[in-house]
Amino acid sequence: MTYSEENYLKVIYHLSIGNTKGITTNAIANEMDSKPSSVTDMVKKLAEKDLVIYKKYQGVSLTDKGRQHAVMIVRKHRLWEVFLVEKLDFSWDEVHDVAEQLEHIKSEKLTDKLDEFLDFPTEDPHGDPIPDREGKIAKVEKQLLSETELHQKVICVGVKDSSASFLQYLDKQQIALGSSIEIVSREHFDQSLTLKVNDRQLSVSYKIAANLFVKTV
Amino acid sequence: MTYSEENYLKVIYHLSIGNTKGITTNAIANEMDSKPSSVTDMVKKLAEKDLVIYKKYQGVSLTDKGRQHAVMIVRKHRLWEVFLVEKLDFSWDEVHDVAEQLEHIKSEKLTDKLDEFLDFPTEDPHGDPIPDREGKIAKVEKQLLSETELHQKVICVGVKDSSASFLQYLDKQQIALGSSIEIVSREHFDQSLTLKVNDRQLSVSYKIAANLFVKTV
DNA sequence: AAACATTTTTAGTTTTGTCTAAAAATATAA
DNA sequence: TTATATTTTTAGACAAAACTAAAAATGTTT
């Protein structure tokens, strides 16, 4: 399995979540900053190897084999992120690019030993679940802050967008995983929210709330 | 810098040690399990980039820039080996293939943080020196056991060959870095040696002794 | 349902890194 | 020092993964 094939599988996997239909070549190309024609070529190759199901013009979906591969890449990615943050003192906005490289290291032993070394973490630094060595992913109860009721007390448990700029914004506003949050009021005009974060009052745009995962206390 | 270019630099670097003349394309091809013609092509590309000096039929040598790159790859390789052994409980014969992959991860921050996390080790699990972040390599006093005098008390500080089979042999014979060794006698017929290793008597072939680095106590 | 717009695929190139086989240069031997 | 053997390079091909431009299929309107 090449580096490139692995990246395709990973992207198809991520696009498949909450998406029952076939993933279009356009969507994949978009996600990978490549061209649809390149995707068509690669997808044919993946289909040859029984990693995806592909019918011309109908989009692609992962086979069980393909999904298993993809999940293992996600597992490695998230374990390495935990390592970088917990052991090497990286901040949560710095880990993505390095983990993007580390996720391709091929050694089951390494992955499992790393998992053990980190004490079998269940979530990465952005609150995303870490598949276990069988590929099983623990279902986490979470909802978007934007879909939470007024005055409901919740705890921040994850981010939907994990871009550096968003994460740095959260740092600046002192919002982190574990922060307790309550929506104090909603502004009808622009849907912005006034929050109480760890007893501090704070106003955020709708977009921020739509990218924060929370759970009820 | 591609994965492949880095591998060439690394191989040229290793072949250059204790070799003042240009490294032949044949020697490189041999080391990389590739063909001399492939090497010629790559070497031209590296010369274009000022990483090596190359004159047709005269072999190659590293430029300062090329050597610096190579040393950084070696640094990463050896740091990761320490990580695998010290933190993840790999044995010294298992680390090479994984480190071969990890050495290509591009992140100066990762390398330096890893170095710090490991407490700035000066040697890898096979006794090879780890270049510092400037690329400086501490000179270690060591000699081959095969060139050591009778009854001289020495300590094992490294291996010349770090193949899994040799390392596993050493494990079996309970020879490790730090073992105290003394040559009790030499057999004239086949140059085999009788050793006293940590007060245990042991007979080894010349080849074994010619692959063990020791230092005088 | 025909016309138009959009999406997807095909066909043909390009780049990177490899190879084989032949040619050229260097090294060795008579 | 000429002949022979070995090493190294060149020339031409190939596979992987990307691209552009054109063709084909699908979707959307009117």
Image (cartoon, coloured by chain):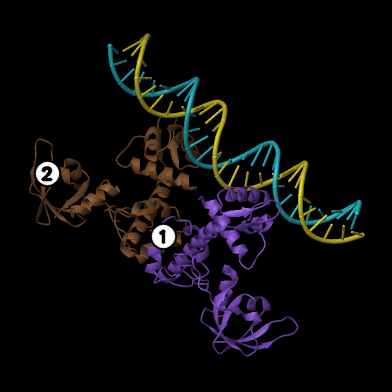
Chain colours: A brown, B purple, C yellow, D cyan
Q: Is residue B136 found left or right of B58 in the rendered image?
A: left
**Residue shown at 63% from the left, 68% from the top:** B18
Instruction: Tell which subunit mark 1 falls on.
Output: A
Q: Are marks 2 and 1 in contact (CB under 8 Å)?
A: no
Query: Disc 2 or 1, which lies upstream in sequence?
Result: 1
Q: Is residue B23 found left or right of A17 in the rendered image?
A: right
Residue A116 location, x and y as percent?
36, 65
**Residue type at the position of mark 2:** Leu
Q: CA distance from mark 2 to mark 1?
A: 41 Å
Q: Is residue A6 visible?
A: yes
Q: Which residue is mark 1?
A: A111
Q: Is residue C23 found left or right of A62 in the rendered image?
A: right
Q: Which residue is mark 2?
A: A193
Residue A129 location, x and y as percent?
30, 53
Taking depth in this image into account, of B95 and A132 the one nearest to the observer is B95
**Residues at discs 2 and 1 both on one chain:** yes
**Residue shown at 69% from the left, 82% from the top:** B192
